[in-house]
Structures are given as C-alpha cells and as structure tokens.
Amino acid sequence: MQKELTIREVLSTLGRSVREYRRMSMLTPILVIGEVVIECIIPFITAQLITEMQMGCGLDVIARYGLVLVALAITSLACGGAAGITCSIAATGFAKNLRHDMFENIQRFSFSNIDRFSTSSLVTRLTTDTNNVQLAYMMLIRMAVRAPLMIVFAIVMAFVTGGSMAVVYVIVSVLLGAALIGIAVKVMPMFRRIFKRYDALNDSVEENVAGIRVVKSFVREEYEKEKFNKTSGSLYHDFVHVERILALNAPLMAFAIDVVYTFVIYFGSKAVVQSAGQAMQIGQMSALITYGFSMLISLMMFSMIFVMVTMSEESARRISEVILEESDLKNPESPLYTVADGSIDFDHVSFEYSAKADRMALDDIDLHIKSGEVIGIIGGTGSSKTTLIQLISRLYDVTKGRVLVGGRDVREYDLDTLRDQVAVVLQRNVLFSGTIKENLRWGDADATDEELVHACKLAQADEFIQLMPEKYDTYIEQGGTNVSGGQKQRLCIARALLKKPKVLILDDSTSAVDTKTDKLIRKGFREFIPETTKIIIAQRTSSVEDADRIVVLDGGRISAVGTHEELLRTSDIYRETYLSQNKQSHDVKMDAIETEGATTREEAEQHA
C-alpha cells in the first residue's frame, strides 16, 4: 500500500472527482457571500431605524426602512435557499463521483491489490468513508464559507457600531479558535484507529453472513455474537472517548456566549445611561448585541464544521488511497490483441504472494501443454493448484520464469484479450442476482437463446433449468442461494463455455455434482470443443483419469506427470489418493494394469 498521503495530495485527488459539479460548487459560496453580506447590513439599518424612532420620525420614515428591511430579508432568504439547493447537488454529485472513481479503480485491481486492502476495508471506504466526506464537503462549500465570513463581517460591523467595545469579540474568537485546534490535535489519531475498527467490524459481519449456514450447522451463534460484540464494543469505547473530548465544544461555546452577552449588556447599558445616548445609542447597542449573537452562532457552526472535517480527514485519506492505488498488473506499451491458440507453457515458473512470504507458493514449474489437450491437476490441500492456474489468465504475475499462452508471454497481451480467451470456473462459484439468461450472458453478452441452451446442455444444466417455473427466465437470488451447489457449478460452467475460449479451466468446479454428471460434462467437452485446451483441477481422481495427462502437485512443485495408468504405477501420491477414493478391489485393478504393462513390454521385445 502507498505511503501516507499528505493533505495536499488528498485534496488534489478528491478535487478531480468534483468534475461536472464544479460549477455548483463554485456558485454555492457566491450565494453564501451574498446571504452573509445582507444579514450583516440588516442590523446596521435596524440600528438606524431605532435611532430615527428615538428622534421622533414619522410613519413614512418607518415604512421606508421597513420596506428596505423586508427586501433585504427576502433577498437573503433567496440566496440562502439557492445555496442550499446548489450545495446539495454539488455534495451528492461529488459523493457519486467518488464512489464511481473508487469502484472503477477497484475493477482494475489485481488480486494482490485487493489482498493489501481487504474486502471489508474497501466496502467501508465505498460507504461510510464516502458519506463522511460528502457531509464534510457540504459543510465546506456552504457553512465553512458562511461561518468565517460572518465572524469577520460581524466583528467589523461591531467595531463600526460599537467602537472599542468590539475588542471582546476578537479576544473570544482567538481563544475559541485555539481551543478547537487543541481538540483537533488530540482526536485526529483516535479517528484513524476508529476507522480500522470499522474495517474489522465489517469483516466480521461479511464473514458471518457469508458463512451463516456453517455457523448454524455447528451451533456457533453464541460464539459469533460474542466475537461481534467484542469488535463492536471496542468501536463503542473508542467513539465514547472521542465524543467526550469533542463534547467540550458545547460548554466552551456556551461560556463564550455568556461572557460576550454579560460584557456587552453591562458596559453597553452603562455607556448609554451615563452618556445619555451620546457615547452609545440604544440602536447601536442593539446592533452590537445582534452582531455578537451572529458571531457566536457562526463560531458554534464553525465548531460543528470542525468536528465533521476532523472526522472526515481520515476518511478522505482512505478514499484517496483507493483512487491512487495502481494495479500491480498493467498492459504493456504495445499489447497483443490476438491469442494464436490454447497452448500453455510454464517455463521454470516460481511464484510467491509477497516478498515477506516464508516460501515460494510455486517452485520451478516446468510444464508444456499442447493446444486442445485435456490436462488434469491433482494434489493435496495447499499444493498450490489454484495458484498455478491463476497465472495463466494473469490474475497474478510470476516471480520468476515465464508463462506463455499461444506461444507468447502472458505479459505481452492486452489483459482483456487474454482473459477473454482463458475462461475460468473458479473453486468458489458466484452467481449474481438476475435471471439465468442474464447470468449466462456474462460469458457472451450477445449470445442467442439457442447458444445459451447449447452451452447448458454441454454443462448438463439444461435438464434442471427446464424443470424450473420460468425456465431460463427464472430469477437467481444474490449469490445463487435458490439453486443447489451442483446446479450453481453447472451454470457457471455453461457461462464459461459461452466465451468460446481457447483455454477452459475448471478449478474443482464439479465437486458438487455426481460422478455420472461429471463424466457427461467431460464427454461433452471432448466432443464439442476439441480444440479448446481444458485444464481440470479436481480432488477426485475419477474427474481426471481420462485426461491426456495428469499433473501431480506437492508443496508447490510438480511431483509427477503422466496418464492415469502411468501414475498408478509411478506416483505414490496419486496411487494413495486413488486407493483412498475407490472401494473396489484395488488388487485386481493393479494386477490388470501390471499385466497390461508386462504384455506391452513383451510385444515390444518380440517386435525388436
């Protein structure tokens, strides 16, 4: 992940997301300035009206002043209302662009980029952090303009109307400003810790909801609730600690208001009485109190802005990290846009997930696959079977060596071109909310209904689809929760087939179907897509025993390569896996293989 960003880098990054809402963002402060100026003029004119009334003016003078005040009030209201509208449009549009920019960049992330952030953290940044920044932006372009301007104008007008007595406003403003800065310095590190707690909380929720069936089957609800409450409790205590500090704003503001009012009323009244209106008139004192009230309200508003901006500063930094994150996988300067065939070559490939890893996930893999071959990959848990196939579609880049597809290094291809020709049905199958047709057309957006049916027949999915009420228009719930695991796997295989790829990879994607259906799927592959290279990762030897070759992985290295019969004779790992999964008479099976091998050797000797 990137080094910590400076404020300037954060503002520059977020500023680029304003885009089409820049005009509204600039118009809002202009309207606010108009509102503030008029609001500061109104007390000044009101003071003049009071003075005129003291001097015994007629109704015509009062009416004239009244019309001016009404006009000013309506204009101020119009400016304030318009500012509210433009501010809302600008802030919500800005938040929309932030989410768009983050999500767009996340789509370019490699798996390693996502690993560095974590899924839960990315969700928090797209939701909670964006909402915080939206509120802060709304305050910055409106209230953060209004509050300082009102403070400055109110103090200036207070000096104009009340003379040296307005010094108290300056003193109070400086003292409150210093107090607010002190609070900011104190709480900022706490907010950083809080947002990490948010990530942990989201992670707990996501994990629990995704695995709710496992939680219930093991009766672990109480344990999960305790774990969630622990994380939530930590977040609660951190927030309480921060809020206790931020709560100092309110008593500080109340104290400041009391001090200002006491000072102005006492000394203002004394000046009016002792000088008989010569040093200060009632109208001036009224204006002075009004300006003091406006200044203090603006200071209170400023404290609210300060709290929100303090909270959102860390959110803004986290959003900027996502937007500025560069994918570890990039297109070359002059990429290839054509994949010649489905041949695959692992040229002494080694791979590690990070520089801090204790060992290589894959170590010196040297494997060459012809276009159209059916290759089985088998190995124990942690043998890096999935890691191996992820290098083919360049979901990760190799650490050492080269991976070639169609005779060219995968790093030479345009990423979209390569992945369009390498269809992968991952171990964790995912269906999205929508109809079966909509899910299938992820493979080919322009596929006809006939092509959808054909792909589903190959994947042995058409039979159960025809039994559904709406057939291919049946709605799939989010995550495919209204279909079985085997049905989900077959739909995902059909979706991959619609890409018409040069390489088809099945990552243990028939584990939830019975052996008969598994065999029919593999038979369909051989008959209908003979030129497509097929790589089948499986736990069951029955899923790969008819492959052209089977690769046995052990600890990230190739332990053996051969046909089913060859590996039964030469590979202890494969033989043990096979024997543990088959309950038939293994001795008879092995004797037949040995006899066949001996006969073959005798025929070869006679021929020689």
Image (cartoon, grey):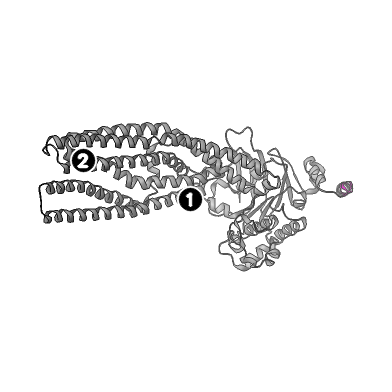
Residue at 68% x, 47% y is 216
Q: Is residue 278 left or right of residue 93?
A: left
Residue in front for this viewpoint, 130 or 402? 130
User: Residue 320 location in percent, x, y?
Assistant: 44, 42
Badge 1 element: helix
- The residues tagged by marks 2 and 1 sit, at their Cα atoms, a distance apart of 54 Å
In contact (CB < 8 Å): disc 2 and disc 1: no
Q: Is residue 210 visible?
A: yes
Residue in front for this viewpoint, 282 or 443? 282
Residue in front for this viewpoint, 242 or 82? 242
Sequence-wise, the earlier of marks 2 and 1 is 1
Identify which amino acid the numbered label 2 is placed on: Leu
Say which mark, if any, is on residue 288.
2
Q: Is residue 201 left or right of residue 569?
A: left
Q: Is residue 535 left or right of residue 606?
A: left
Range covered by the magenta-colored residues:
584-591
Residue at 54% x, 47% y is 412
Q: Is residue 606 visible?
A: no
Residue pointed to by mark 1: 104
Q: Quadrant of residue 186?
A: top left
Q: Residues within 10 Å of mark 1 (few under 14, many from 20)?
A: few
User: Residue 113 location in percent, x, y?
Assistant: 53, 42
Q: Quadrant of residue 207?
A: top right
Say which mark, if any, is on residue 88.
none
Badge 2 element: helix
User: Residue 159 location in percent, x, y?
Assistant: 18, 38
Residue at 70% x, 56% y is 486
Magenta span: helix, strand or loop, mainly?
helix
Q: Residues within 10 Å of mark 2 (few under 14, many from 20)?
A: many
Residue in front for this viewpoint, 6 or 153? 153
Is residue 375 covered in magenta?
no
